[in-house]
Image (cartoon, coloured by chain):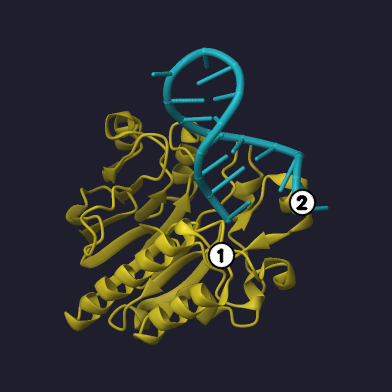
Chain colours: A yellow, B cyan
Amino acid sequence: MRIATFNVNGVNGRLPVLLRWLDETEPDVVCLQELKAPQDKFPHAAIEAAGYGAIWHGQKSWNGVAILARGCEPLETRRGLPGDPDDSHSRYIEAAVDGLLVGCLYLPNGNPAPGAKFDYKLRWFERLRAHAAGLLAQGAPAVLAGDYNVMPTDLDVYKPERWLDDALFRPEVRAAYAALIGQGWTDALRTLHPGERIYTFWDYFRNAYGRDAGLRIDHLLLSPEVAPRLRAAGVDRDVRGWEKASDHAPTWVELTPR
DNA sequence: ATGACGTTTTTGAAACGA
């Protein structure tokens, strides 16, 4: 089975790209981020017609996350991370699909750093780590997929020296990601492709995609119960070159069936 | 250091992204 994560950067503006990609690659489970649409403007009918059940947590203008499942309905287990009742951003949704617990997340960008937005990012990361630790403690077969807004190492950014002070690469954020991995999660792409330059995002500016000036910030983390099933992982890079493309490319793992 | 581009919204200048 294939599980993919895709920051669409506007689910309605990007609908033709999303539907074409679903049709061509037929992923079994899809985590979407940056819907940029309120709850009642999610294109449910078009996604259903494409053969996918869906749950989503929308928000006007910003953020928004969804989980799609091919040929079935995701069973929602949570919306929003625990730990801050005042957090109004739609950045986390979780569902049981095909015997897996799938968490779809959109971690805050955090720029400019330092500042209030960076503090929010670090606090959100702490809440994610607390929740992720709980999933591991339950022994859940889980996948945490999404836009983490973190390049974990120098290998994950085209020019590390230029990004040292950026909220996506500052030491605190890389340390938070490393601590999450340290709980026992497997970074699927990096595990199957050690030492390889793999990017999932290319800026719209300065022909970044043409120059391959990219970042690896979209990740799929597997719990210990799921990691032995990992068979392949990759990025659908060509989607970034399509007409009206998102600045992110879909990123995926292939798991052996249960 | 800035801005390059692209999305969204009290439709047009501004906020946000990474």
Residue A258 in view here: no
Q: Position of residue B7 (x, y in %)?
A: 52, 34
Contact, CB < 8 Å: mark 1 with mark 2?
A: no
Q: Residue at x 45, y 76 (%)?
A: A177
Identify the secondary structure beneath mark 2.
helix
Decide if residue A240 is on the left or right side of residue A104.
right
Cα separation, mark 1 vs mark 2, equals 22 Å
Q: Position of residue A239 (x, y in %)?
A: 59, 47
Q: Position of residue A30 (x, y in %)?
A: 37, 53
A145 or A125: nearer the eye? A125
Q: Residue at x 66, y 50 (%)?
A: A203
Residue A126 in view here: yes
Task: Residue type at mark 1: give it.
Answer: Leu
Circles 1 and 2 on the same chain:
yes
Instruction: Classify mark 1: residues with Cα within 10 Å, few (<14), some (14-19) or many (20+).
Output: many
Instruction: Classify mark 2: residues with Cα within 10 Å, few (<14), some (14-19) or many (20+).
Output: few
Would you identify the image quadrant in which residue A158 lies? bottom right
A171 or A197: nearer the eye? A171
The residue beneath circle 2 is A210
Would you identify the image quadrant in which residue A185 lies? bottom left
Decide if residue A79 is on the left or right side of residue A154.
left
Decide if residue A138 is on the left or right side of residue A33.
left
Q: Position of residue A227 (x, y in %)?
A: 36, 80
Identify the secondary structure beneath mark 1.
loop
Task: Residue type at mark 2: give it.
Answer: Gly
Q: Nearer the viewer, mark 1 or mark 2?
A: 1
The residue beneath circle 1 is A168
Q: Residue at x 27, y 81 (%)?
A: A225
Q: Badge 1 sits on which subunit?
A: A
Sequence-wise, the earlier of marks 1 and 2 is 1
